[in-house]
Image: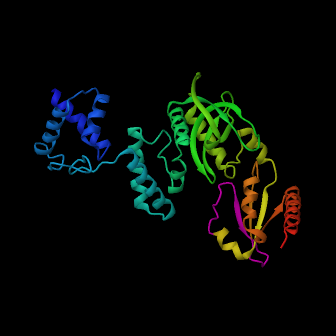
């Protein structure tokens, strides 16, 4: 391959991956591909791509930078936006065409190494705005690198419950978004125990090589994902032993009044471990039963329906809710009018 063809190939590659790149941008990125060229030579190569290969618009000035003519390409940022939009179309609007394109683009992204080892990075606009914080973006970058290379991280973590900094370590497996922000699911360095770590609570973070590479990362990811599906939100069993213990306990049963029964019934598969049953007692009410290791987030969901939903069993949980409701009543009684 001649030196000129090698330069032209590199220029095409940069423009394909960075639509809108300028001449200055090309000159900066070419050395990363092992090509050093003067601005004059680069300008001649651009002219060749315009007039001989017709790959660039044949104009003297391109205010929006260089974009390949007749070929549609996406930068990594643009690909992320497209994947997000397709995800919302396919999931929320059940569009089969969007799902098909999403699958094809996801496979292409994985082959190029732009979407991570566990599929495309899907974000809503709210999620993307949350991650604009520079500190969180850097934390996210290090975590993604650790996930990609299956390496461990050591980090300083602070939660309101503990009230002080803790130095922790683990193998990051996947990043997920849930209600209050981004979480990174990490595995203990020695045991197959998994923890959700809020990214905005991580103060310091670095990759550590002393623990080697997690050879079981793929299996760990599948196990962690299964455990998350057995919980409610981020309150899921931390390991398989906790799940086994949970399965031995009686289910939590919640009852929903007929005024909101249709809302509950429209998603009978609301949870893979839950069961939705219309009652046949003439009330039109619906019962939802589920076994959970930690019911805190589930109870918060039940409370969001006010008096139209209540816990029916087990008795210990019913009494706990009665006590809490009495405290809430007393708190409101103390509010002056």
- What residue is drawn where x is 22% and y is 35%? 9
What is the quadrant of the N terminus in the image?
Answer: top left
Please say whether residue 284 is one of the residues in the magenta stretch: yes
Query: In the image, is residue 1 above or below residue 93?
Result: above
Residue 63 image offset from top left, x and y in percent: 24, 51
User: Which of the two residues, 94 or 187, is positioned nearer the viewer here?
Assistant: 187
Total marks drawn?
0
Please say whether residue 289 is one of the residues in the magenta stretch: no
Q: Is residue 213 visible?
A: no
Residues in magenta?
266-285
Residue extending farthest to the bottom is: 282
Q: Is residue 178 left or right of residue 292?
A: left
User: Hey, which quadrant is residue 110 in on the image?
Assistant: top left
User: Hey, which quadrant is residue 199 in on the image?
Assistant: top right
User: Which of the two residues, 170 or 131, is positioned nearer the viewer here?
Assistant: 131
Please tell me whether the stretch drawn in magenta is mainly helix, strand or loop: loop
- What residue is drawn where x is 40% and y is 54%? 82
Query: In the image, is residue 192 above or below residue 101?
Result: above
User: Which of the two residues, 57 or 9, is positioned nearer the viewer here?
Assistant: 57
Residue extending farthest to the front is: 336
Residue 162 image offset from top left, x and y in percent: 77, 40
User: Hey, which quadrant is residue 47 in on the image?
Assistant: top left
Residue 327 image offset from top left, x and y in percent: 87, 61
Q: Is residue 32 left or right of residue 192?
A: left
Q: Is residue 173 visible?
A: yes
What is the quadrant of the C terminus in the image?
Answer: bottom right
């Amino acid at each position: 391959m001649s030196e000129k063809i090698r330069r032209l190939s590199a220029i095409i590659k940069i423009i394909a991956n960075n639509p809108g790149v300028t001449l200055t941008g090309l000159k900066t990125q070419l050395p990363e591909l092992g090509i050093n060229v003067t601005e004059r030579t680069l300008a001649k190569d651009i002219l060749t791509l315009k007039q001989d290969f017709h790959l660039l618009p044949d104009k003297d000035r391109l205010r929006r930078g260089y974009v390949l003519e007749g070929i549609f390409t996406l930068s990594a940022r643009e690909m992320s936006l497209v994947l997000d939009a397709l995800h919302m179309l396919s999931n929320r609007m059940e569009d089969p065409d969007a799902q098909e394109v999403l699958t094809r683009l996801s496979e292409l992204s994985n082959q190029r190494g732009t979407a991570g080892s566990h599929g495309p990075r899907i974000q809503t606009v709210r999620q993307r705005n949350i991650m604009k914080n520079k500190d969180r973006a850097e934390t996210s970058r290090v975590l993604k690198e650790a996930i990609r290379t299956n390496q461990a991280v050591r980090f300083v973590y602070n939660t309101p419950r503990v009230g002080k900094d803790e130095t922790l370590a683990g193998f990051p497996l996947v990043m997920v978004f849930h209600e209050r922000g981004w979480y990174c699911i990490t595995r203990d360095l020695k045991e197959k125990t998994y923890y959700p770590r809020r990214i905005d609570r991580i103060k310091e973070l670095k990759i550590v090589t002393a623990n080697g590479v997690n050879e079981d990362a793929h299996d760990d990811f599948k196990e962690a994902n299964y455990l998350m599906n057995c919980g409610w939100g981020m309150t899921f069993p931390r390991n398989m032993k906790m799940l086994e213990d949970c399965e031995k306990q009686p289910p939590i049963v919640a009852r929903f009044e007929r005024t909101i029964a249709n809302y509950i019934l429209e998603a009978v598969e609301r949870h893979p471990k839950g069961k939705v049953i219309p009652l046949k007692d003439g009330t039109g009410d619906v019962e939802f039963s589920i076994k959970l290791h930690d019911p805190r987030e589930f109870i918060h969901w039940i409370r969001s329906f006010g008096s139209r939903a209540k816990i029916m069993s087990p008795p210990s949980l019913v009494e706990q809710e009665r006590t809490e409701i009495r405290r809430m009543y007393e708190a409101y009684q103390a509010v002056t009018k």
